[in-house]
Amino acid sequence: MNRRDFLLSGAAAIGVVGAAATVLRMGNPQAAQAAEKFEVTKTEAEWKAILSPAAFDVLRKEGTEYPGTSPLLNEHRKGIFACAGCDLPVYPSETKFDSGTGWPSFWQEIANAIGKTEDRSLGMTRTEVHCRRCGGHLGHVFDDGPAPTGLRHCINGVALTFKPATA
């Protein structure tokens, strides 16, 4: 196999994995949340009218933004990160840390701000986190974070807004 064939086969493999991830994600969009009742509910058209296409894909279709693309990744001011769908405060800036993953990461949420469901997509079991008020998909939580919780909430920046603290 020459270098060109090797590179083309690698690119093809990445494409297949990406397509499979999309199919698996689309086959199970917020199935667990569907049974839950949320304070804020809207039709798909209403969500599309208030959210950017990227935010709609993440919050309503369980998409994932590309790593390293969120301006919130480098947000280090004191304040609150809120759900981009319903404005519920979900993470305090004091719990944000640089995980090196390319997504905003937090070691603790604000009390009673998120819901969790088991996510078995992509051939693995993960814990999905969503806004407890509107059900919007935020990201996933893993047990490889820093003290004191040992958790890493790996959150899509497009699913959040930032509100700086007032002096």
Image (cartoon, grey):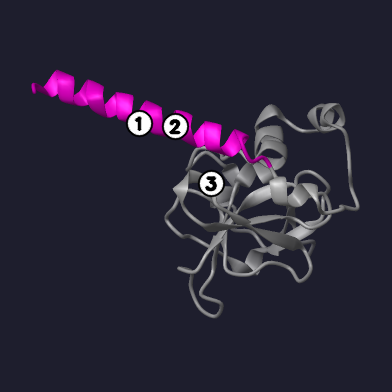
Which residue type carries mark 2?
Answer: Gly
Q: Is residue 154 visible?
A: yes
Of labels 2 and 3, the one closer to you = 3
Whole-Å distance between the Cαs marked 2 and 3? 13 Å
The dot on residue 100 is none
Residue situated in front as seen by the camera: 40 or 69 = 40
How packed is label 3: few (under 14 Cα within 10 Å), some, or many (20 or more)? some
Which residue position holds label 2?
18
Q: Secondary structure at mark 3?
A: helix
Q: Residue at x 89, y 48 (%)?
A: 40
What is the quadrant of residue 110 in the picture? bottom right
Q: Is residue 159 left or right of residue 46?
A: left
Q: Split into 4 quadrants, where in the image is the N terminus?
A: top left
x then y, percent, for residue 28: 63, 41
The dot on residue 121 is 3
Q: Secondary structure at mark 1?
A: helix
Q: Is residue 61 left or right of residue 71?
A: right
Whole-Å distance between the Cαs marked 1 and 2? 6 Å
Which residue type carries mark 1?
Answer: Ile
Contact (CB < 8 A) between labels 3 and 1? no
Q: Is residue 50 left or right of residue 16?
A: right
Which residue position holds label 1?
14
Q: Residue at x 73, y 56 (%)?
A: 164
Whole-Å distance between the Cαs marked 3 and 1? 17 Å
Of labels 3 and 1, the one closer to you = 3
Contact (CB < 8 A) between labels 1 and 2? yes
What is the quadrant of residue 58 in the picture? top right
6 inside magenta stretch = yes
x then y, percent, for residue 92: 69, 65
Q: Split into 4 quadrants, where in the image is the C terminus?
A: bottom right
Which of disc 3 and disc 2 is earlier in sequence?
2
Q: Residue furthest left?
A: 2
